[in-house]
């Protein structure tokens, strides 16, 4: 495979939701986590842990949990609301694919915070802000190995709703109380194509020197 330039990786790595079920070599999954741990974190505290889930039984349990939350939150609330704007509706319609097919991904990498996040936004921003650079590193490293994935928070500990019919993720994965899950990333070989993701033009969200004259 021809090496991908850093520019192309950054500019064409979008959420890859449709994944083949072919297994991913263990060494590739380990490489993704190693790349994730190269990310910066507040105070270099590296307050992350990663759980690589490949067992079909556990993947099915995670998928069932995500299905419950996804149906309730995305299907029943966001998509059922006639006031949901078209752009948001488009994104969440795509997200429903993962709600229905999460277990088809051959691996799901769960990212955890090693401490509970307080309500204090000042502290919380540093904590959450310390795991998402790792998540993006993981996605870019995946891309370099011909793999894709998407960050999913629904079904993890800080999701807006908790499960009723399914055990929480902490129970499915035997996670101790003080460790909190913040994202799960299904990883696999893409079915879809890579391409430049739709973003607002950078000029529309950039200010030089100060906000306005
Ligand atoms: C913090 C964060 C939370 C996200 N949570 C979810 C989620 O719960 N479910 C989901 O399907 N996608 C989730 N996503 C994926 C986004 O919907 C996706 O990255 C965004 O729509 C951009 O997609 P694109 O790169 O294909 O344009 C999340 C992304 C981020 C960064």
Image (cartoon, grey):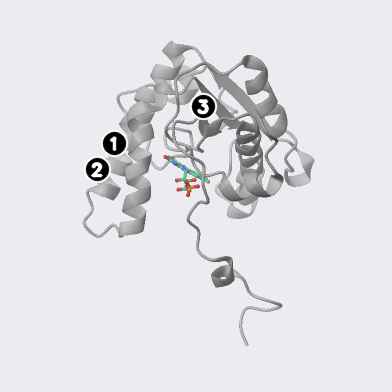
Q: Is mark 1 within 8 Å of ligand 1?
A: no
Task: Note whether 124 is above or below 38 in the view shown.
Answer: below
Q: Are marks 2 and 1 in contact (CB under 8 Å)?
A: yes
Chain-order first, disc 2 or disc 1: 1
Q: Neighbour class for label 1 at 10 Å: few (<14), some, many (≥20)?
A: some
The dot on residue 189 is 3
In front: mark 2 or mark 3?
A: 3
Residue 63 screen position, x and y as percent: 39, 24
Q: Residue furthest front?
A: 2
Q: Are marks 1 and 3 in contact (CB under 8 Å)?
A: no
Q: Secondary structure at mark 3?
A: loop
Which residue is drawn at the image coordinates 65% and 22% (left, top)? 28
In front: mark 1 or mark 3?
A: 3
- Spatial distance from mark 1 to mark 3, Cα to Cα? 25 Å
Q: Neighbour class for label 3 at 10 Å: few (<14), some, many (≥20)?
A: many
Of 93 and 157, the residue lying toward us: 93
Which residue is drawn at the image coordinates 55% and 28% (left, top)? 110
Task: Give the residue number, with chain letter if any, for mark 2.
Answer: 76
The dot on residue 86 is none
Residue 177 screen position, x and y as percent: 55, 25
Q: Neighbour class for label 2 at 10 Å: few (<14), some, many (≥20)?
A: few
Q: Secondary structure at mark 1?
A: helix
Q: Secondary structure at mark 2?
A: helix
Can residue 163 be seen here? no
Residue 95 screen position, x and y as percent: 37, 40
Task: Give the residue number, with chain letter if any, for mark 1.
Answer: 71
- Spatial distance from mark 2 to mark 1, Cα to Cα? 6 Å
Chain-order first, disc 1 or disc 3: 1
Q: Quadrant of residue 135?
A: top right
Q: Quadrant of the C terminus?
A: bottom right
């Amino acid at each position: 495979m021809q090496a991908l330039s850093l520019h192309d990786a950054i500019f064409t790595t979008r959420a890859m939701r449709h994944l083949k079920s072919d297994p991913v070599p263990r060494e590739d999954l380990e490489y993704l986590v190693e790349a994730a741990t190269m990310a910066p974190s507040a105070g270099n505290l590296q307050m992350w842990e990663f759980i690589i889930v490949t067992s079909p039984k556990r993947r099915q349990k995670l998928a069932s949990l995500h299905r419950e939350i996804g149906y309730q939150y995305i299907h029943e609330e966001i998509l059922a609301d006639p006031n949901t704007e078209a752009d948001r509706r488009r994104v969440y319609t795509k997200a429903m694919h993962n709600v229905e097919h999460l277990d088809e991904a051959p691996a799901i990498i769960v990212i955890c915070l090693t401490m509970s996040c307080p309500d204090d936004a000042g502290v919380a921003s540093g904590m959450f802000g310390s795991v998402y650079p790792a998540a993006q590193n993981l996605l870019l490293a995946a891309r370099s190995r011909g793999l894709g994935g998407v960050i999913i928070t629904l079904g993890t500990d800080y999701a807006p709703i908790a499960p009723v019919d399914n055990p929480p993720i902490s129970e499915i994965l035997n996670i101790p109380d003080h460790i909190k899950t913040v994202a799960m990333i299904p990883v696999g070989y893409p079915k879809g194509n890579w391409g430049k993701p739709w973003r607002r033009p950078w000029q529309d969200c950039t200010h030089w020197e100060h906000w306005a004259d």
